[in-house]
Amino acid sequence: MQALYFDGHSARATPVRLHVTEAALHAVAADPGGNAGAEAATAWQWPLTELVWPERTRHGQRTIELKGGGTLVATDAVAFDAWRARHGHRDGWIVRAQQHWRGVALALMLLVATVAGGYRWGVPLIARGIVAVVPQAADQALGDAALASLDRQWLAPSRIDAARQDEWRARFGALMDQAMPDAGRRLAWQLHFRSGGESLGANALALPGGHIVITDEMLALLVGHEDTVLGVLAHEYGHIEHRHGMHAVARLTLVSLAVSVALGDFSSVIVAVPVLLAQAGYSREAEREADAAAARLLRASGRSPEVMVLLFEKMGQQRDDKKKSESSASRTPNLPIAFASHPQDDERIRFFREAAR
Ligand SMILES: [Zn+2]
C-alpha cells in the first residue's frame, strides 16, 4: 500500500510502502538512499495496538495517527479501504451506519427524541427528587433573593397605604383560618403590595418561602370584588404549598447544567438562578395545581370558586383594550412567573365553574 509518512517533526513527506504483519504495521521507504540521505532511517514499524486507524468516509484521504505525533497519509482512499479489507478489517457498526443517510437520519431522530424526552419527563422527575430533599429554609433564602431581584427590575413601591394593606392581610388570614383550621398544616406566607407599572399591570405572583406579591393594578381591576382578590391570593398560596418555585429552580438548574456540560461553560449556572426563576414561570401542570388549591381554599372558607371567573373575564377585557390602544406595537415585556402571563383562559374558567357546582 502506497502512503506518505510524516515523522511529526518536519513537514517533509517520505513516500513509503505499508504492510501489516501479525503484530505490527511496517513502512519501508519507497526510495531508500534518495534525498533522505544514507544515515536516515528507511524502515519503521508500529505495534498494531498503538494505532488509530482512520474511519472509512465517502470522501477524503485516509490518515493514520501514530504515537509520537507522526502520521501516515494514503491519498488513494479507495485503494486503502480495499487493502484494509484484504487484511480482514471490518468496519464497526457505527462506521457502517454513518455511510447511509437512513442510519444518520435515524440517529438524529433518536438524539432529538432522547433530548426531548429527557426534557419533558426526565427533568421534572429528577427535579421532584431534588426538591424533596431540599430543606424549607432554602426556599426562604431563594425567595428573598428573587423578590429583591424583582424589586430592582420589575416592581415599584405600592401606593396603597399601610392600613389598607393590613386589612387585606387580615382578610386573607381569616380565609386561611377558615379553610385550614389546623394551623400546623398551614405554611407561612407574607403578603407584599407593589405597583406593577406599565410592564406588569394587574398581576400577582408567588415566590418560594411564602412571598405573595399583588399589584395595585390588580386591586384596582377587582375593586368591589373582595372574594376574587382572595381567590387570586389563594392561587398564589397554592404555588407556595406545592413549592412550584423550587421545582422551577431545580428544573432550570438541571437544564443549565446539561447545557453547561454540552458547552463546557459553568460560569452562569448558579449565579443567575433568582433571575431565571422569575423569567421561567410555572408549568401548566403547576397552574392547574394552584387553581385547584384556590378552589379548595375558597370552598373550604365558604366562598364559591365561581368568583374566579370574573377575574379571567376582567383580565381578558383588559388585554383586548390594550391591544386596541397599542397601535404603535410597543409590546410590553412579559414576566412569565406572574399571574397575567399564565395560560388562559377558557380551560380555567371551565375549571372554576365546575368546582363551584
Ligand atoms: Zn399561577
Image (cartoon, rainbow, N blue to C red):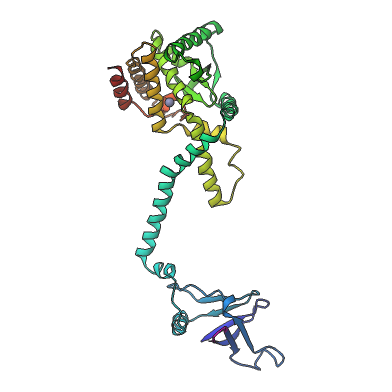
Task: Place residue 236 in its image quadrant.
Answer: top left
Query: Would residue 23 be counted in the magenta stretch?
Result: yes
Comparing 117 with 39, the one in front is 117
x and y, in percent, of residue 317 in the image = 34, 19
x and y, in percent, of residue 67 in the image = 63, 75
Tell me which secondary structure the magenta stretch mostly adopts.
loop
* Quadrant hosting ligand 1: top left
Residue 23 seen by the camera: yes
Task: Place residue 16 in its image quadrant.
Answer: bottom right
Left or right of 26? Residue 97 is left
Q: Residue furthest right?
A: 39
From what the image shows, is residue 129 above or below residue 342?
A: below
Comparing 265 with 132, the one in front is 132
Comparing 321 with 289, the one in front is 289
x and y, in percent, of residue 34 in the image = 65, 92
Task: Place residue 25 in its image quadrant.
Answer: bottom right
Residue 249 seen by the camera: no
Residue pictured at 39% horizontal, 51% vertical: 113
Q: How many marks?
A: 0
Q: Residue furthest top?
A: 163
Q: Which image quarter holds the C terminus? A: top left
Residue pictured at 30% horizontal, 26% vertical: 346
Query: Would residue 245 be counted in the magenta stretch?
Result: no
Residue pictured at 39% horizontal, 55% vertical: 110
Left or right of 158? Residue 181 is left
x and y, in percent, of residue 243 in the image = 49, 29
The span picked out in magenta is 20-24
